[in-house]
């Protein structure tokens, strides 16, 4: 199975900060990577597919990059509604998720 | 919209049937997944069924105990869970994919989830 490792597990940020979350795959997944946002008690929401394609309606402050085994989710200027948990998912071979990164208010 | 139901508290060894009602899209065109999240843990894929219901797959940890199925006449997808274990305790999410086969693994829309607690 392909393992997905996210870092950090928790990230403290202030409104306006630039935030970067990393996701590493245990083997090459090309760009078959998605990012999801999850708020407490809410359904996960797809933000980015194919490593860098922003879903319709997702603010442009979100961006994704990477290929192969190293990927990054960046929020250019964190807004109050962005405090949430972010998870990566590979869909190259079966499906596996990272353990999640909680972005909390500093 | 995806609305799950059927969660609850059961003892180890017992059964539960989860159901998910879909609306707002052409349900029969898309494969559907169940994904779960144990307390304090990451997301874990559980099962997938093709758009026509003729093909399905389950994660190894639930094979032989859980069965995914769908009814395109009622726009529902179910997860029959037998021989439940403490480690099956989780929120179970019904998830839509972006295409029709079991190979469709991009999860583009999620339900709110239903909580299953297995405890003696």
Image: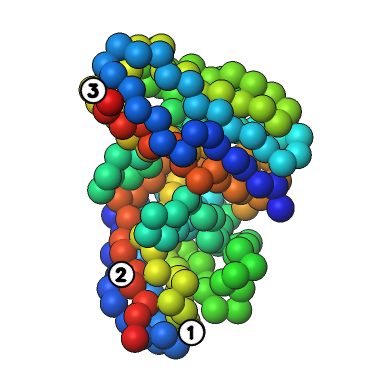
Q: Which residue is mark 1?
A: B83
Task: Specify few, some or many for label 3: CA neighbours under 10 Å numbering under 14, 14-19, or 20 or more.
Answer: few
First in sequence, mark 1 or 2: give its number. Answer: 2
Q: Which residue is mark 2?
A: B7
Image coordinates of residue A91 in percent, x first then y, are 63, 41
Q: Is residue B108 among the parts visible in the rendering?
A: no
Figure quadrant of residue A56? top left
Image coordinates of residue A21 in percent, x first then y, are 50, 27
Name which residue lies at 64% across and 34% down. A24
Nearer to us: label 1 or label 3: 3
Pick the front one: B43 or A93: B43
Q: Are marks 1 and 2 on the same chain?
A: yes
Instruction: Point out the image quarter for the N terminus of chain B.
Output: top left
Q: Is residue B51 above or below residue A6?
A: below
Figure quadrant of residue B104? top right
Q: Is residue A73 above or below residue A96?
A: above
Figure quadrant of residue B114? bottom left
Q: Are marks 2 and 3 on the same chain?
A: no
Image disc number at residue A80: 3
Image coordinates of residue B59 in percent, x first then y, are 61, 63
Give yes or no for contact between labels 2 and 3 (Cβ–Cβ under 8 Å).
no
Measured in 3D between alpha carbons, the distance from the residue under mark 1 to the one under mark 2, in whole angstroms, is 15 Å
Q: Chain of mark 2?
A: B
Q: Is B25 situated left or right of A49 in this image?
A: left
Q: Chain of mark 1?
A: B
Nearer to us: label 2 or label 3: 3
Pick the front one: B33 or A70: A70
Name which residue lies at 46% across and 79% down. B85
């Amino acid at each position: 199975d392909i393992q997905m490792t996210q870092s950090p597990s928790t990230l403290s940020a202030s409104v306006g900060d630039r935030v970067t979350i990393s996701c590493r795959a245990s083997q090459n997944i090309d760009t078959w990577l998605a990012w999801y946002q999850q708020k407490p008690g809410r359904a996960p929401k797809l933000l980015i597919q194919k490593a860098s394609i922003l879903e319709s309606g997702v603010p442009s402050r979100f961006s994704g990059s990477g290929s192969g085994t190293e990927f990054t989710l960046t929020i250019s200027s964190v807004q109050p509604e962005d405090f949430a948990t972010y998870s990566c998912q590979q869909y190259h071979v079966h499906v596996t998720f990272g353990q999640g990164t909680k972005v909390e208010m500093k | 919209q995806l609305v799950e139901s059927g969660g609850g508290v059961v003892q180890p060894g017992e059964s539960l049937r989860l159901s998910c009602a879909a609306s707002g899209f052409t349900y029969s065109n898309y494969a559907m997944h169940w994904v779960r999240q144990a307390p304090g843990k990451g997301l874990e894929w559980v099962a997938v069924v093709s758009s026509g219901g003729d093909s399905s797959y389950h994660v190894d940890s639930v094979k032989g105990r859980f069965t995914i199925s769908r009814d395109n006449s009622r726009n529902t997808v179910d997860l029959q869970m037998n021989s439940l274990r403490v480690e099956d305790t989780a929120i179970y999410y019904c998830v839509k994919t972006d295409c029709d086969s079991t190979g469709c693994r991009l999860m583009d829309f999620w339900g709110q989830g239903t909580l299953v607690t297995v405890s003696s």
